[in-house]
Image: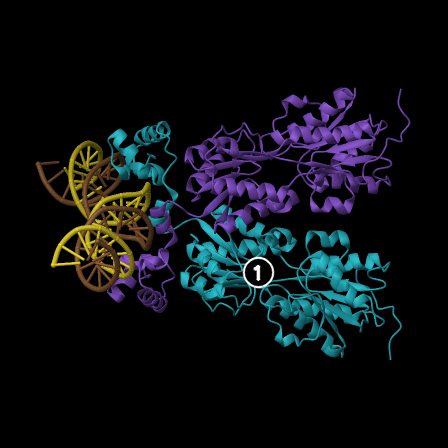
Chain colours: A cyan, B purple, C yellow, D brown
Amino acid sequence: MKATLQTIADELGVSRSTVSNAYSRPDQLSPELRARILSAAQRLGYSGPNPTARSLRSGKVNAIGVLLTDNLSMAFTDPYAVAYLRGLAEAASARETSLLLLNLPKDEAAGRRVISNAAVDAFCLYCVPDWHSALELVRSRGVPVVIGEDPQAFGPEASYVGIDERAAARRLGEHIVNLGHRDIAVVAHWIVDDGVSGGRTGQVHADPDDLRYYVTGERVRGFRDAFLAAGVPWERVVLINAAGNQREEGAEAAAHALDRLDRATAVLCTSDVLALGVLDALRVRGLQAGRDVSVTGFDDIPEADAAGLTTIRQPSVERGRLAGELLLDPPEDPVLRRLTLPVSLVVRSTTGPNTAKEKS
Amino acid sequence: MKATLQTIADELGVSRSTVSNAYSRPDQLSPELRARILSAAQRLGYSGPNPTARSLRSGKVNAIGVLLTDNLSMAFTDPYAVAYLRGLAEAASARETSLLLLNLPKDEAAGRRVISNAAVDAFCLYCVPDWHSALELVRSRGVPVVIGEDPQAFGPEASYVGIDERAAARRLGEHIVNLGHRDIAVVAHWIVDDGVSGGRTGQVHADPDDLRYYVTGERVRGFRDAFLAAGVPWERVVLINAAGNQREEGAEAAAHALDRLDRATAVLCTSDVLALGVLDALRVRGLQAGRDVSVTGFDDIPEADAAGLTTIRQPSVERGRLAGELLLDPPEDPVLRRLTLPVSLVVRSTTGPNTAKEKS
DNA sequence: AGAACCTTCTGTATCGATACAGTACGTCGG
DNA sequence: CCGACGTACTGTATCGATACAGAAGGTTCT
């Protein structure tokens, strides 16, 4: 039989409470007794209090649930996500808390089971669409939650760490129109969506106000803000959906902006990863970024620097770290649970003045 | 007060057991009663049986602990690791099990606490050095364990999924010597080690039989096997330590092979990531891989293909998947718990015949 | 009709710990 | 010499569920 606290207690003729204290409250017993208990435990192959029982009694499990939609590997593949998770892990680790990666399967019932069964002290909703059926269940669990997308999505009880997506995108848009670009394409991921995948990559006609996925939607709206302010009507912009947030999909999307007579002189992307794909597409076509076509990204992932990508830098690791801290020590004051972090425009070599002959 | 099973039971005047059955054993009660129970639960904001209490009673927590040393972000940064974790996550997810990422801090006492407190059904020892003090504690937890490094490190009770590292490396070595290379450098990570970091990047003189870190050690020994068989003495090989397994460190290590009069004509690396760094270093120096200098990697990560890197392909995702399956349904027969997967040599463009003038 | 059986629910013991109040036994100031 | 206090330990209730034996009631078979 597996050893328990009682086993050790019986062995030494002390009470179970005392053995428990030897592990959890060393100040409650004499050092000598504690030493005897620990050595007896070692002898009997007892590896310390059972974590589950301890959690049940104490009400803490020392884990943060990270909800990931569908494809868990995305969390590992997207450099921005990696940075965010690293920050989250740092904050958690500092409090001896671990991350429980929760993969939400497509099947809704299974997803509900995953959430209800997760032994966690808090949830980090990461890349979970605002309308996902899981949200309600997460709320009913009654544990702290931090979100990074639509600040309104979860009511005031949730913490929020994010950036002003729309204003940030607007700065990119302004940078582009200030460079004289008027023939503009926007590559955005997941703006059409069948509820499961991001749809097909290709040009779409959509009202930015209707986009369902918050982050992308805000970024596209931010671009539009800049365009309208500069007198570029939205109808003139070529909007391209990318089926996912991967480099290949950026390259594929770029084809729809580049392989046409009225080729765009600027391509704005909703993420750096997509933008890197666009740069790949330019290279294949013998076009030079920043001269023939200007390209922008979003996030400032590590690869962006090497590629010379103009982008918006957001504090990714910091964002994750703050999310973790908000979850583990939620401030009383609801105002302090809502953090909007600063961003900056990073101009590199993939953007430059419009050199194309101006259309009528 | 938070709702429990009893709350619902009292509300409807049924027994607690029945409410429990409504969730866990629907066949044990009439559909109508079950429906009443579930709707009462919804009304009272009850989100289902408490996972911790359930785990305590049933002895299962539906989580696999993934032990990561020190820097958790490495797990996300190294493409091979990402693939492995993805496979593991797939296997886990298929059984509604999640991954608990356990970050082992430098501080040993804290590390012990992390392991003892982890509520998991099994441990996956991933990138944990064989001599790490945590291993003993993991063993004493008495749960299934899978390892991916030294098959001998954990005794026969552990499962093992790996490859024949040494034989695989030997094939790379043979490929290189068959191409006529005799001035060879080996870039290996973590072959010197102060117990914490991987030491300083630079040339070292070491007996391959003394290398502490299993995977790297086996690969280096495999290279040596090929060299010796071809009559290249080990003393002739330039062995370079990389302080870590990152591209930059590969590039830095390459300097020690390239910036010298007796420049190596072939550089063998213990990982693709390092090899990509070596290719970067070649490019900077205006050297062409496969013509001026041959370069090999190990793992066949996705980026290797694009780079034309000659390497050993190992089934990374599959390896993780099998590890997960072994953990969740450990076969009775110990033999079936030890899997050695096949690998293949993938020859691409970074290797070619030795064109340098033969030394005396 | 009576035994055997199924379905549907109940009741109690238990999983392995922690919380907290309580006891026993010094020690110390006045 | 006595009450106040601190230290070291004990005992019981409890955390929130599941397991399993059993009871009540209706059916089926012979």
Q: Which residue is tagged 1?
A: A127
Q: Quadrant of the N terminus of chain A?
A: top left
Q: Is residue B277 left or right of residue B138?
A: right
Q: Quadrant of the C terminus of chain A?
A: bottom right
Residue shown at 83% from the left, 42% from the top? B284
Residue A282, quarter of picture: bottom right
Q: Is residue A139 left or right of residue B321?
A: left
Q: Work out whether residue A285 or residue A109 is closer to the camera in this orientation and state it.
A: A109
Q: Work out whether residue C5 or residue A73 is closer to the camera in this orientation and state it.
A: C5
Q: Is residue A19 above or below residue A252?
A: above
Q: Is residue B76 left or right of residue D16?
A: right
**Image location of residue B34, percent across then percent down:** 33, 64
Residue shown at 36% from the left, 33% from the top? A46
Pointer 1 local density, CA inside 10 Å: few below 14, some 14–19, many at least 20: some
Q: How many marks?
A: 1
Q: Is residue A26 above or below residue A204?
A: above
Element marked by disc 1: loop
Residue shown at 74% from the left, 78% from the top? A235
**Image location of residue B173, percent across then percent down:** 75, 29
**Image location of residue B4, percent across then percent down:** 31, 59
Residue shown at 28% from the left, 59% from the top? B6
Q: Is residue A283 above or below residue B83?
A: below
**Image location of residue B222, percent across then percent down:** 69, 27
Q: Work out whether residue A119 or residue B204 is closer to the camera in this orientation and state it.
A: A119
Q: Work out whether residue A14 or residue B76 is closer to the camera in this orientation and state it.
A: B76
Label 1 marks a residue whose chain is: A
Q: Is residue B356 left or right of residue B113?
A: right
Q: Is residue A347 visible?
A: no
Residue B143, quarter of picture: top left
Disc 1 marks a residue whose amino acid type is Cys
Q: Is residue A183 visible?
A: yes
